[in-house]
Image (spheres, helix red, strand yellow):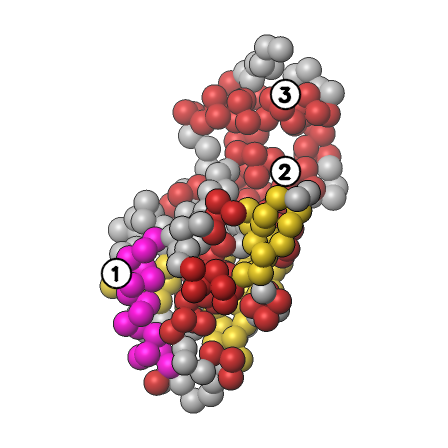
Amino acid sequence: MNDIDLSPKEFNLFRDYIYEKVGIALSDQKSTLVKGRLNKRLRQLGFDNFRAYYDYLVHDQSGDELALFVSAISTNVTSFFRETAQWKWLETYLPQMISAKREKKIRIWSAGCSSGEEPYTILMFLQQHLKDFESWDIKIIATDISEKVLKKAISGIYDATQVEALPKNTVIHAFEKIRINNIAHYQIVPSLREKVMFRTYNLVTDRFIFKNHFDMIFCRNVMIYFDDITRLEVIRRFTTVLPKGAPLFFGSSESLTTHRESLKLIGSSIYQRL
């Protein structure tokens, strides 16, 4: 079956809509990507042209189709212990952070958490490097715009290929082996899952709901979808809930050379709140 064509006019409609709703900036070069990734969805809905799908998208009051649209055109690629250099840096930073605390409480925001590998990695890291891990009050707020990936994150279930690169001792302490359709899978243990609060959240347009400070914020491979104006606004939001000296983690492919009025580069795509 041939792909449905996407005209320049139709592409501009989608581009304006996605920018308004979630801040994603699509360049002209993304037209082929949008066409390729949405063709399957059009066929599922029985549409034979992109304008009909656009009208369906903008009139969907539930927001479900918007979430599906965003998931289709963005890349939810992640893995456990991604950005190795950042975890090495944290090994040095964590003792400093702990020694400065007045109470045994840790709060972390994983923004754009995708299917959960990042927040669960944070917990695995803390489990490995806090000798009295169980005595700490640890909560991770994990947000993403896509309900689809959040459902996977909440389940904490991953296939064998996703955990095979992890050290055996990490797998023993963080996962329990289960079988689904007689195929081996690994699920994050309940004692770790209960420390993560997952929720849908739009970094650009949703009302800013956080009032208390976080000890650190992870927002990796999200900024690449935003233009300069949107990046600056998102950073402003982060710095309102990040105390001075606390770290903010971005993806290795993301550069903030023009948005560092309140941040200082201190490591591999790691910034410190000034």
The residue drawn where x is 56% and y is 54% is 186
Q: Residue at x 43, y 25 (%)?
A: 28
Residue 27: x and y in percent read 42, 30
- Classed neighbour count for the residue bearing mark 3: other residues with Cα under 10 Å, few (<14), some (14–19), many (≥20): many
Snapshot quadrant of residue 39:
top right
Q: Is residue 254 visible?
A: yes
User: What mark, if any, has residue 193 been given in the picture?
Assistant: none
Magenta stretch: helix, strand or loop mostly: helix
Crowd band around label 1 with a 10 angstrom C-alpha radius: few (<14), some (14–19), many (20+): some
The span from disc 3 to disc 2 (Cα, nearest Å) is 15 Å
The span shown in magenta is: 83-98
Which residue position holds label 3? 50
Tag 2 or tag 3, which sits nearer the N-term?
Answer: 3
Q: Quadrant of residue 209?
A: bottom right
Of 69 and 158, which appears nearest the observer? 158
Please identify the quadrant where the C terminus is shown.
Answer: bottom left
Q: Nearer the viewer, mark 3 or mark 2?
A: 2
Residue 247 point in image, percent of width and height: 35, 67
Instruction: Give yes or no for residue 241 being in the magenta stretch.
Output: no
Residue 193 appears at what percent x and percent y? Answer: 59, 65
Q: Nearer the viewer, mark 1 or mark 3?
A: 1
Q: Which residue is mark 2?
A: 68
Which amino acid does the dot numbered 2 rest on?
Leu
Q: Position of residue 147 (x, y in %)?
A: 64, 48
* Mark carried by residue 267: 1
Residue drawn where x is 32% and y is 67% of the image:
90
Q: Is residue 92 magenta?
A: yes
Q: Is residue 120 above or below residue 241?
A: above
Compared with 79, 238 (above or below) is below
Q: Is residue 190 left or right of residue 239?
A: right
